[in-house]
Amino acid sequence: MNFKQYLGVILVLVVFPYSLSFAQVNMPVFGEQQVLSGYAKAISGETISYFSVYPDYAKDALLTRASDGKKAIEWETAPIPDKAKGPYVYFSWIAAHSTGTNSGNRNFDLYINDKKILTFTTRPKNYPPYWEFSGDDSTKLVFELKKRDGAADAHGFAYLRVPLSAYQKGEPLKIKVIGQAQNSNDWYMTFKYTFEEKVDVDAPPFLLKAQSPERPLIITVLHFGPPQTMQVTVNENIKQKLEVKNGINSFTLPVPVSNDTSAVDENVYAKIGKMEFRKTVTAKPIIRREIYLIHNSHNDIGYSDIQENVEKLQDKNIRDAMRLVEKTKDYPEGSKFIWNIESLWAVENFLNSSTPAEKEEFFKDVRDRRIGLSATYANILTGLCTPEEMNWITLYGDSLRKTYNLPINTAMMTDVPGMSWSMIHALASNGVRYFSDGINYVNGMADMGDRIGYSLKAQGDKPFWWKSSSGKDSILFWAAGKGYSSWHGTPQGGVFDRGPKKIADYMTELDEKGYPYSIVQWRYNIVSDNGPTDSTISDFVKQWNEKYESPKLILSNVSDVFVALEKKYGSQIPVLSGDFTPYWEDGAYSTAKEETENRLLSEKVLQLENIAKQQNKAINPHWLYEAKRDIVMFHEHTWGAYNSISEPDVPFVAHQWNYKKGFVDSAKIYTDKIEAELFPKVDSASSIVVYNSLPWIRNGYVETDTPAHFNGNTLLDDKGRIITVQRLSDGRIGFIATEVPAKGKAVYKAGPMVKRGVEPINIIDYTNDKQTGAINDLRPIDKANIIDTSIYKGLPLALYVKGMDPANHFFSAKKNEQLLENGFVLRRKSITCDMEGTNGVEYVITQFNGLDYMQVAVTIDKKAIRNKESIHIAFPFLINDPEVKIGIDSAYITPESGQIPGSNKDFYSVQRWLDVSNKDYGVTISSPESALFEVGNLVDEREVNNGTKLWRTENHSSNTVFAYVMNNYWHTNSKADQDGKVTFNFILQFHKEFDLGDAQRAGAEATEPLMVYAQ
C-alpha cells in the first residue's frame, strides 16, 4: 500500500516574540541564577557558518584565532535590567573552541566595554565538564562542554559573571575577544544567537510501523529556564501535556494517515506558561523509499594530515571495520555493519602490513560483501590522463579480483567533479559495470561544492547509462545527490542526534524535485576527510527500521545499491553519451614542471612497453607496475595540504608536497631502469636504431648522440638509401627517419660524405612580430596567412594574467632572436622575451625539411609569486567559420556538442590533440605537456558568484584557443607558487579538409615520438 500523506516543512509562527531578558538557569560554578542573553547583536569580526550545540538554530558564529594578535570579535549583550539587584549579573551565550585540533595552549583576551578583564586558555584534547577563568574584579568566565564536533572540538555554553556595580543598568555590555599572537589557526567562536523561547513543529515524510498507518509529528522546543509543562493540541482532537526542560526538547506524536491523497490542513497549538504558538500546516504525499547508506572514509592521500599518517588511519579503519562486521553479524539484514573502501591504495597498504590471519579475514569479508572495494586505485584527476593511463587506474583491482576471486565490479570516485569519457571504456573492459560518484559537497556554497561548476546540480541523483565514445561499452553512472560529504562534522554516534532531521530534509528535497526512484544512494562519511568508521551506525539503522516503515535504511555494499536500482529500473534509466569534462585539473598546473614531466613519463612507459612487446623482450614486472602506479598517483586529486595556500612555508605543507613530488621522481627512476634494461648503453655503436611504437608506417625527425665513428654527413638505411644528416650545434645529429615500419624499427649505419650545394629546403614560411616575438605571419596552406593578429599578436603568444580578471593581462615583449640551427634537415630559431611574472620567455621555432608540420616550443622561466596569477599561450588563427574539435579516444567533442550536462566549459582536458578548422582547411595542435586548453576566452576567476567563481554554462568554437599552462587560483590543496623553467612543446599539423584519422595520428605521433638508440 502506498500511503501518500505527510505534513510539510513547518515554519514556526509565534504569536509574539519571547526573547529572554531573564531566565533561571542552573550553571556550573554559579549554581541556579537568573541569566541574561549574552549575545544580542554583532559589532565586528569575521563570521563563519559552523556546527553548534544547537545546530538547527545557532548556525553562524563570530570567529577569532590565536594568529597575529589582531583578530578581534566584538558583540553586544542584552541590556542589564533597570531592576537588577544583587552583587552580580550573569550572561550566557553559545560558544565553541578548538581543542581536538589544537596544536598547543592558546590564549584569548576578553574585554568588556574596551577594558581588558581576563585571559582564558584553551588546551589541546581537553574535555573537562567545564573550565573557568577569573579577572581581578571578581568577573568570572565559565565554559560548559556539551558536545564535540566531528573534529573533536568543544561546543557548549559560556557563562559570564560580572559585578553589577561596575556597569550601568539599562545598558548592554560590549564584549570583545582577541586571540593572542601565537601564529596559530586555533580558534574561539561566539555564536550569533539570541536566546529565545521557540517551538518548531515538523512532520517528516516518514511512515511509522503501526497497525494502522501513522506518521510522526515531531515537536521541538527550545526552552530556557526551569522545567515547565507544555500543552499541545492538534486539530482539537489530539491533546498532550509534555514537560520541557532547559535546552532542546524533542517529542514525537503519532498522527493517523488517511488514504486520501489530497492536501489536508493540520492545526497545531502549543502553550508554555503564558507563551502561545500556533501554526497551520499542509499534508503532502508520502513516497516510500529505501535509503542505501554507503559507509566509507574519503581517502585524501594527504590534505588533512601527512600521507604517512593517512596510511595509518586507513589501516585502522579496515581493522575497525572487520571488528564491527564480526560484532554485528547477527543483526537484521540491512543493519549489519558494511564498510566501503574507495581507494585500493589503502587496501594495498593494509595487505602489505597485515598478518596472514588478517588477510584471510579481510578477503572473507569482501567475498561476503561486508566490505566493498572500489575497482579504482585512488581518486584520480582523469582529465590529466591518457586513455592508456586510465587502464592503469584499475590494474590493482583487476589483479585482486583474479588472484583472490573477489567481487569487484563497481568503481567509486570521491570529491572530484567530472570524469573523462575515456574512463568508460577503461572501466568496462576491466570488468566494471557500476560507478558511484561522490562529488565535493559543501552545503551553502553557490554551486553546492567547491570549484565544481554545475556538475552536482546537473547530475546529482540522476543515474544514467553512460555509453563509451565507441558506443560499444556502457556503465551505470550515479552521482550521489549529497556528494560524499553531507555527513561531515558528524562525530561517531552523532547520527542519533542529527540523523532524523538530515534524513527528513533529504527526503523532502527528493520529493520536491520529483526524484523518480524509490532507491536512494547516500554516502555516509563522518567527521571529515579520512574520517573513521562509525561504531554506532548499525544500532542507529536497527532502531530506525524497528520504528519506521519508510524510509527504510540499508547499510550497503556500494555495488548492491546499483544492483537493486538496475533490477527495478534498469530499462527506465536514461542513456547519455559524451565527456563529463572535469573541473579540478587546473590545480595540477600550480606545479607545471612536475605535471609536464609526469605526462612525458606516462607516454614513455607506454612506448617502452609496446617496443618491448615488439622485440619479444620482457620488462621487470615490478618496475613496470611501480612506474605505472607512481604516474597514476601523481594524478591523484590530493595535490597538497589544506593550508597549502594560507601557510605555504610551514613544515606540514612542505612535507606533503615533497611526498607528492616523490611520485614523479620515483616514476622516473623506474622508467629509467626499464629503458636501461631494454636498451643498454653500447660503448662502440655500429648502428642507429629508430623504433616506431605506433601501428602505422611513419616518417619523423629524430635526434641522437653522434656515434663514435661517424665522420660523414649521411646515413644509410636498411634499404641502402642515403639519409641526410645535420650536425647540430650541441654536437648531436638530426635526420628525418622515413618509412619506419608499423610497430617496428629502422636501422641506420654510417654513410658516405656527400657534397652539398646551396639548395633550398622545403619549409613553411613565417615571420615574427617585432613587439611580442610570436609568429604573426604563417603561410602553410596555399600561401595564405592563417594568423589573426587583431587581438593577440601571433602564436604561440605567452600572456600573463595578473590577478583573477583576465582583462588584466600582459604579452611577452621581444628582446633578441637567434638562428640556432640552419641546415639541410631543419631550421631552428630562438626568440627571447621579457614578460610580467617571469624571468623571461623563450620561443623556439623548428621547421623540418619536407615535413608538413612545425614545432613551436615555449619555455617559461617563472618567478615565484603568491598573488593570484596565471599564464596562457595563445593560438589565434585566421580561419573563418571555425569548429574546434577536442580529441577523446576515437572520437571528439566540440564546445557546442559532445559533453554531458554539468561539464566544464571554462577549459577542456585535451588528451593528445585539438583541431581548429573549417570545411576547407585548418590546423591540428598537439602538445605532450599541456593537458588543458581554453576556447575563445581566458578563464575568469573573479569571485562574482556569492564569493566564488562563476562558471560558464555554454561556450562556442572560436578561431583562438589557449593552452592553459600555469596558475595558482586554488585557495587550498594546490601549490601557492612555482618557479623555474618549464617548456611546453606544440606540434602544428596543417591540413586541408579535416580528417579524424589524420588528427588522431598527428596527436599520437606528437606524444609518442620515434625513439632512437645506438646499438
Image (spheres, rainbow, N blue to C red):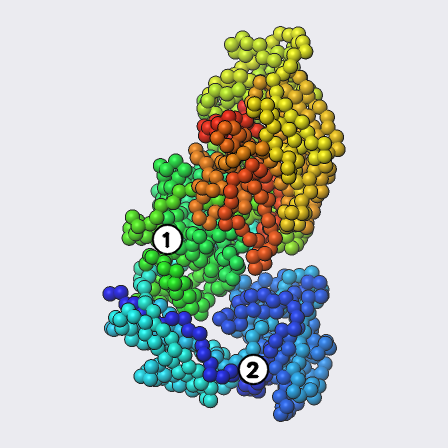
Residue 794 is situated, as x and y percent measured from the top left of the image, at: 64, 34
Mark 2 crowdedness (10 Å alpha carbons): few <14, some 14-19, many ≥20: some
Can the viewer see residue 628? no
- Residue type at mark 2: give it: Met
Residue 48 lies, with reference to residue 778, above or below; the image says below
Asked whether 677 or 418 is in front, the reply is 418
Q: Is residue 943 left or right of residue 626?
A: right
Can the viewer see residue 193? yes
Q: Is residue 656 left or right of residue 819?
A: left
* Residue at horizontal 53 percent and vertical 17 percent from the top: 738
* Residue at horizontal 69 percent and vertical 31 percent from the top: 769
Q: Answer with mark 2 or mark 1, whichever residue precedes in sequence.
A: 2
Q: State which quarter of the image contains the N terminus.
A: bottom left
Residue 73 is situated, as x and y percent measured from the top left of the image, at: 66, 70
Query: What residue sits right under mark 1 in the picture?
Result: 557
Residue 792 is situated, as x and y percent measured from the top left of the image, at: 64, 38
Residue 311 lies, with reference to residue 331, above or below; the image says above
What numbered label is drawn on residue 27?
A: 2
Residue 152 lies, with reference to residue 407, above or below; the image says below
Asked whether 757 or 725 is in front, the reply is 757
* Residue at horizontal 63 percent and vertical 84 percent from the top: 79
- Residue type at mark 1: give it: Asn
Q: Is residue 827 left or right of residue 438?
A: right
